[in-house]
Amino acid sequence: LGAYSGFALNIVCLVRNLVFFFLKEGTRPMYAATAILTALMVGVGVLSWQGPVSLLILVALAVNTVFLSFGKPQLLRWSILGTSSAVLAYNVIVFTVGGILNEGIAIASSAVGILRFRRTAREKRSESSEM
């Protein structure tokens, strides 16, 4: 495929996901890991530079790293709509069918999660106002 930026940055994302799995949100180690991993992504993005197309995936994954560290699922879902759209554009440009399908599913999943959360929150408000 020749999508070196995507490959390299996804390796960093794999490490990020493992690190974040073991860290607690809102702690100094989480903030430090976020800063280090975001800087690592920028560095890897620069080293694997393929031209302006690399900015799509580099910025999207760096922003996604920051939003992941907040530990707020609904905020993360909203960020995924934007970041996965940028990664989807990258995947379309480098034409990776698997990547296109993956990001399409991520976007759809986030949209469903946002709508479902809104409906549930609205129902809870309705129930509490009836009491």
Image (cartoon, helix red, strand yellow):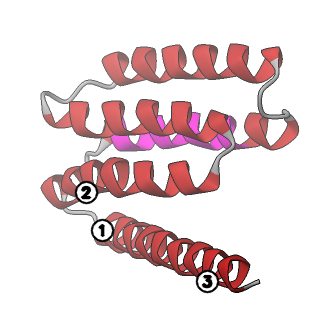
Q: In the image, 6: left or right of 23?
A: left
- Extent of the magenta region: 5-17
Q: Give the distance between the C-alpha atoms of the residues marked 2 and 1, in whole angstroms.
A: 6 Å
Residue 26 among magenta residues: no
- Please say if the residues under marks 1 and 3 sit with CB atoms less than 8 Å apart: no
Q: Nearer the viewer, mark 1 or mark 3?
A: 3
- Please say if the residues under marks 2 and 1 sit with CB atoms less than 8 Å apart: yes
Vertical placement of residue 28 versus 18, above or below: above
Q: Nearer the viewer, residue 6 or 77?
A: 77
Vertical placement of residue 59 versus 14, above or below: above
The amino acid type of the residue labelled 3 equals Glu
Q: Give the distance between the C-alpha atoms of the residues marked 1 and 3, in whole angstroms.
A: 35 Å
Residue 65 picture location, percent across and down:
54, 34
Q: In the image, 62: left or right of 22?
A: left
The amino acid type of the residue labelled 1 equals Ile
Vertical placement of residue 72 versus 37, above or below: below
Residue for badge 2: 91
The residue at the point 35 percent across, 39 percent down is: 60
Residue 1 in view (yes/no): no
The residue at the point 81 percent across, 18 percent down is: 29
Residue for badge 3: 123
Give neighbour class at mark 2: few <14, some 14-19, many 20+ (Cα, 10 Å): many
Q: In the image, 66: left or right of 1?
A: right
Residue 46 picture location, percent across and down:
32, 17
Residue 13 among magenta residues: yes
The amino acid type of the residue labelled 2 equals Asn
Residue for badge 1: 100
